[in-house]
């Protein structure tokens, strides 16, 4: 069973659509995010808050609340207790005293969503804050804040910083932002593979049609698996395999490939 710290494909569902909660849980995602923020209009915030529950599934259920300083933040935080949620996603995380106080008071693990230049600049402090279990990348909001394109090249530095910040703080690999394409499996898989190659461990999902492609993007290809097996069968110490020098750092990478392959096989068996 995955948790807020290790889920691979968490799926957003609007908090004001409780009729979709169980469908989201049955979609093949390994966690469900009830969204009180962007997916819910201001006039529906109270209703969405009242619909919060986690008893529709055995999967981890997280809640994305409205950000610190918004009209709805305090009520969102107060509504989280007693439901058995796996975590709270804090949007527009930028550190500071308010964020530290939230983390100290929260009864749930915190996933910090980095969505701004200031958030990225504070990412290492945010990752090291008590009760934060993972960073996530709000890439679309980040691009809006910076005025940059939502492309792999434009976001390379930001993504790399989140991976580094997570590693320095001893957190699980971060969660990549959404892909807006819903039906182009090649684009979705490519985005997931790009994130995995940079060191991300998961990707936010906005529609069930994206789940299979995201999983495929994070799973190693057959050639990678064959390479990893050959490396680990080559013995200890420094050896040459297929014209390349192999030592322990390479074997560490090979073991990671096989772990990803095992995870993908287990996910496929339970999907």
Image (cartoon, rainbow, N blue to C red):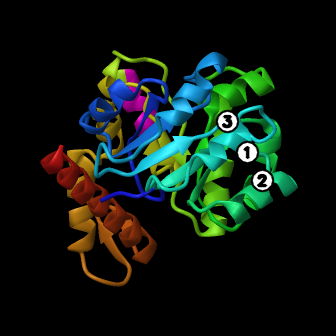
Q: Residues within 10 Å of mark 1 (few under 14, many from 20)?
A: many
Between disc 2 and disc 3, the foreground one is 3
**Residue toward you, 156 or 163:** 163
Q: Is residue 20 left or right of residue 139?
A: left
Q: Residue tagged by mark 3?
A: 66
Between disc 2 and disc 1, the foreground one is 2
Q: For the residue labelled by badge 2, is the local secondary structure a helix, a strand or a loop?
A: helix
**Residue toward you, 235 or 171:** 171
- Residue at horizontal 24 percent and vertical 36 percent from the top: 26
> Residue 192 lies in magenta, yes or no?
yes
Q: Residue tagged by mark 1?
A: 93
CA distance separating discs 2 and 1: 7 Å
> Residue 189 lies in magenta, yes or no?
yes
Q: Is residue 9 left or right of residue 34?
A: left
Q: Residue tagged by mark 2?
A: 99
Instruction: Point out the tag, 2 or 3, that comes first from the N-terminus.
Output: 3
In this picture, is 59 found above or below 50? below
């Amino acid at each position: 069973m995955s948790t807020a710290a290790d889920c691979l494909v968490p799926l957003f569902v609007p908090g004001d659509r409780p009729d979709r909660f169980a469908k989201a849980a049955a979609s093949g995602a390994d966690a469900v995010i009830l969204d009180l923020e962007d997916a819910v209009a201001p006039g529906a915030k109270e209703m969405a808050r009242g619909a919060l529950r986690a008893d529709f599934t055995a999967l981890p259920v997280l809640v994305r609340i409205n950000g610190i300083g918004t009209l709805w933040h305090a009520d969102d935080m107060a509504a989280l207790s007693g439901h058995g949620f796996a975590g709270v996603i804090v949007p527009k995380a930028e550190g500071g005293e308010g964020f530290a106080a939230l983390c100290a008071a929260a009864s749930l693990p915190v996933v910090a969503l980095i969505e701004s230049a200031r958030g990225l600049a504070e990412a290492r402090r945010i990752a090291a804050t008590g009760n934060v279990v993972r960073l996530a990348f709000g890439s679309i909001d980040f691009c809006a804040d910076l005025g940059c394109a939502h492309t792999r090249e434009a976001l390379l530095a930001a993504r790399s910083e989140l991976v580094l910040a997570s590693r320095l703080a001893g957190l699980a690999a971060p969660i990549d932002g959404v892909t807006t394409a819903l039906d182009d499996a090649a684009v979705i898989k490519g985005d997931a593979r790009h994130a995995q190659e940079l060191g991300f461990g998961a990707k936010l999902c906005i529609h069930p049609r994206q789940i299979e492609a995201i999983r495929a993007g994070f799973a190693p290809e057959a050639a990678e698996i064959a390479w990893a097996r050959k490396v680990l069968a080559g013995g200890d110490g420094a050896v040459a395999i297929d014209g390349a020098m192999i030592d322990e750092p390479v074997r560490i990478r090979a073991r990671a490939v096989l772990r990803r392959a095992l995870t993908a096989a287990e996910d496929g068996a339970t999907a």
